[in-house]
């Protein structure tokens, strides 16, 4: 560290310089994050110093966390769901598998996950000592439910399905998986980190949530399509009592037990997540999602007109193409299989889509 601190002016010119090196979201088509909604920013600032790790000191913020769980539980058709605000999909997935492992103590536990699962499951399996059993995908990149039967056995602590896969934006056959999980008496976790804030706002949403009796837990992230500030994830569980298996004693805190993975936890991004939900309501969220889906369709149509076929028709706002070049200045990503991947987040407006398509067309000319 410096022996003597620098001036505020020097400090902020340094920080501004660093910040300028960051890319603006305008040309980023590769991210599942987006600039936070203005009400999220305002709420975040109001709750900047709050710590949900010691909720007795911040009862107002703690009540907002409960409200967030209640709202998202209701969105998932189970207003009495248990849950807490995590740092994102990774923590939610780790904690869900931790619960599943505690519920079924066995010598060599395994989890059955689609090949398309997010890499957070690799981390979860490593931390928890779980064998990961990948299930192959069908031609549309969805988990092949027929291939599950042979993989689930007595040592399977959880089955995982995805709503809005990271790479191709498709949904696994959740209703079918829910039945299999019930038949096999297996904990079923749905990773809806991305799709959880999209699918409920579509015109004809396919059921994927607690309406399906086999679903035990759901990851859903306000810091993705919920336009909250980072970090804001949520883990929801059907039976709030599941969390008791994770409790540790916290003798000197305002609460005597804690089931979260993190200790100190931000209240600011939780307030921001609540702010967006309250401000937009179902109606506002439907409008945002309808816009993103319309832009996704336009992106696919435009790219196909230019000769770049879609890899699949997505269920959420992720578009993928057979196309190996990118116009200068744009950020897209690539799937493991090499497809170009574009996520039509709220900042990817119609104008942005048209500008990208024009640059793609100019490149080919
Ligand atoms: N589950 C699914 C289905 C996800 O897509 C992701 C993240 C996670 C879990 C993990 O969530 P956290 O990153 O919140 O822990 N998917 C994005 C991805 O890997 C995350 C992301 C966001 C990456 C913005 C890059 C970026 O610029 O693509």
Image: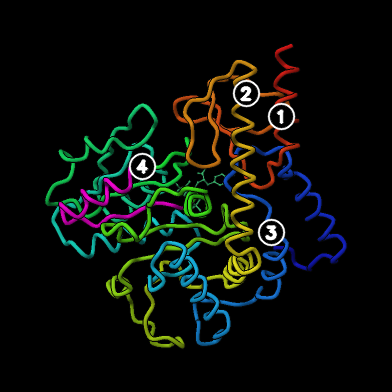
| SS state under label 3 | loop
Q: CA distance from mark 1 to mark 3?
A: 23 Å
| SS state under label 2 | helix
The residue sitting at 66% across, 67% down in the picture is 279
Ligand 1 within 8 Å of the CB at mark 4: no
Report the quarter where the C terminus lies.
top right
| SS state under label 4 | loop
The residue sitting at 70% across, 24% down in the picture is 327
- What's the mark number on residue 356? 1
Mark found first going from the N terminus, 2 or 1: 2
Q: Which residue is mark 2?
A: 303
Q: CA distance from mark 4 to mark 3?
A: 29 Å
Ligand 1 within 8 Å of the CB at mark 1: no
Residue 163, given in percent of the width and then of the height, sits at 42, 47
Mark found first going from the N terminus, 4 or 3: 3
Asked if residue 180 lies in the magenta stretch, the reply is: yes
Q: Which residue is mark 4?
A: 172
């Amino acid at each position: 560290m410096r022996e003597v601190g620098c001036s505020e002016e020097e400090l902020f010119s340094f920080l501004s310089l660093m910040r300028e090196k960051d890319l603006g979201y305008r040309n980023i088509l590769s991210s599942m994050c987006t600039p936070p909604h203005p009400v999220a920013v305002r709420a975040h600032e109001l709750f900047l110093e709050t710590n949900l790790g010691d909720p007795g000191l911040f009862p107002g913020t703690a009540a907002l966390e409960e409200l967030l769980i209640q709202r998202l539980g209701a969105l998932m058709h189970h207003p009495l769901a248990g849950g807490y605000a995590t740092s994102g999909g990774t923590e939610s997935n780790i904690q869900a598998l931790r619960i599943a492992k505690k519920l079924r103590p066995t010598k060599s536990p395994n989890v059955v996950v689609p090949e398309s699962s997010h890499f957070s499951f690799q981390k979860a399996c490593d931390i928890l000592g779980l064998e990961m059993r990948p299930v192959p995908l069908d031609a549309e990149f969805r988990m092949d439910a027929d291939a599950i039967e042979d993989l689930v056995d007595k040592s399977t602590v959880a089955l995982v399905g995805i709503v809005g896969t990271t790479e191709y934006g498709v949904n696994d056959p959740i209703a079918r998986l829910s039945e299999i999980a019930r038949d096999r008496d297996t904990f079923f976790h749905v990773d809806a980190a991305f799709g959880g804030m999209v699918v409920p706002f579509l015109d004809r949403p396919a059921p994927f949530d607690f309406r399906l009796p086999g679903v035990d837990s759901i990851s859903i992230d306000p810091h993705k399509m919920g336009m909250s500030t980072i970090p804001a994830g949520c883990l929801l569980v059907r039976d709030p009592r599941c969390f008791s298996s994770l409790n540790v004693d916290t003798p000197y805190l305002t609460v005597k037990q804690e089931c979260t993975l993190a200790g100190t936890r931000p209240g600011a991004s939780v307030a921001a997540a609540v702010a967006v939900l309250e401000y937009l309501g179902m109606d506002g969220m439907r409008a945002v999602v309808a816009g993103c889906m319309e832009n996704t369709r336009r992106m696919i149509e435009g790219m196909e007109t230019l000769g770049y076929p879609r890899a699949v028709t997505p269920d959420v706002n992720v578009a993928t193409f057979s196309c190996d070049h990118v116009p200068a200045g744009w950020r897209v990503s690539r799937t493991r299989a090499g497809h170009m991947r574009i996520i039509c987040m709220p900042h990817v407006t119609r104008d942005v889509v048209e500008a990208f398509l024009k640059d793609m067309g100019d490149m080919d000319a």
